[in-house]
Image (tube, rainbow, N blue to C red):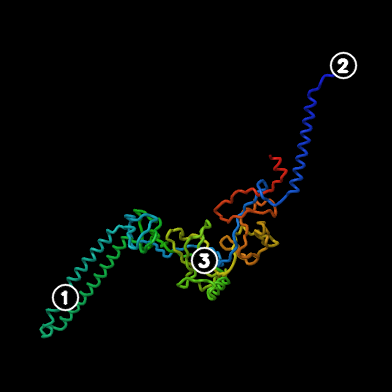
Amino acid sequence: MVKTSPVNHTLPLFIRSVHLAFIACTISVLLGCGAKEGASPPSGNGGPPLATVGVITVEQQRVALQTELPGRVSPLRVAQVRARVNGVVMQRLFKEGSQVSAGQLLFQIDPAPYRATYDSAQASLSKAHANLLQANAQVQRFKPLAEANAVSQQEFSSLVTSQKQAEADVAAAAAALQSARINLEYASVTAPISGRIGQALVTEGALVSQAEATQLALIQQTDTVYVNFTQSTADVLSLRKAIATKQLRSAADGSLAVRVVLEDGSELPYKGKLLFTDLTVDPTSGQVTLRAEMPNKDGLLLPGQYVRVRLSQAELPRVIALPQQAVTRTGQGDTVLVVGADNKPVSRNVKVGPAQNNQWLILEGLEVGEQVIVDGFQKMTVPGAPVKTVPWDPKVKLPATEPSAAPVSAAASAASK
């Protein structure tokens, strides 16, 4: 009797799995070959992403070459309020740090002794006037008698002399009264000029002295300020030549405009004007002092503050200005990335001039109308790959990269179905 082996039911499943795996490998190979044979320029979705870059269009403009120099602010007018009489300060009649007007009462020094002196001088003047009236009356009464030889000429001359002395006494008493009035007025300390007053340097109860001229406060006029700065004689000579050859446009009054940059790097929105250049050169440094006048209505400029002054030296009528981040500076030369054919970045050598307002002045290497890449360099991971350009705005963040168009072969389309 022949024995039969039991039937293995798992063998057909294994063969079926191997068959399906073989079919899948064959289809993948065919798809790969079809993709290579059918490769074409991007026309559909699914390809590598396009890098989005910010660009600016090259254009020529008029640029004023500027020199940035350190300067120091000084007030237009300064007045030291000092004691002009001796006495004790009774009151302080202003708010520290406030704006005061010329003639405004600031301090009150004890006026009692000066008022008493004034009253005494006024009484002395009244007495002198009375003596003068009596002397005048005697001269008028004795004059006809003297003409008639009724009295001696010596007696009449004595009366005339007494009259002159009485007139002199009146004048002296009037002068004493005026002096007493001045001292009484000095007891009320007023502001000599309009401006901003600082802290009070004395308090109520302090004894101030006329001999020492005790300083009470300081007033500074700061609605308009001076900015003093220095420049080398060579630069001053270049500046004068630029003005003489009309390379710089001056204001209607012939003054030259200047700008002021604060410590935080911000530039004041309004312009000042160059007032004068000193005639003397400092022998130790070879520098010349210049002074500019700046409006200061908002009070941003404070006396003694250090600032930077931007002074125009000449004007270039046609020049290209690029943000500094667009230029790559190396020892071998300066380059920029220009968007070329098919939106592909191309490196371009340029000649860079001086820097102005965080921009490089490009003297050679670019043409009007070309697009220069300013932002998005980190997104260009594939050298020579096309990019998507958007107008550059330093305040706007670049959008995310977008997928580029990629081909879809017939085999892949069939497989997807």
50 w.r.t. 125: above or below? above
Mark 1: which amino acid?
Ala
Residue situated furthest right in the rendering: 1
Of the pair 214 and 375, the residue shown nearer to us: 375
- Kindly identify which residue carries mark 2: 3
Circle 3 SS class: strand
Q: In terms of image quadrants, where is residue 157?
A: bottom left
Circle 1 or circle 2, nearest the eye: 2
Of the pair 352 and 9, the residue shown nearer to us: 9
Q: Residue at x 85, y 19 (%)?
A: 5
Q: Residue at x 43, y 58 (%)?
A: 298
- Kindly identify which residue carries mark 1: 135
Circle 2 SS class: loop
- Kindly identify which residue carries mark 3: 229
Circle 2 or circle 3, nearest the eye: 2
Image position, residue 159 (x, y; %): 16, 78
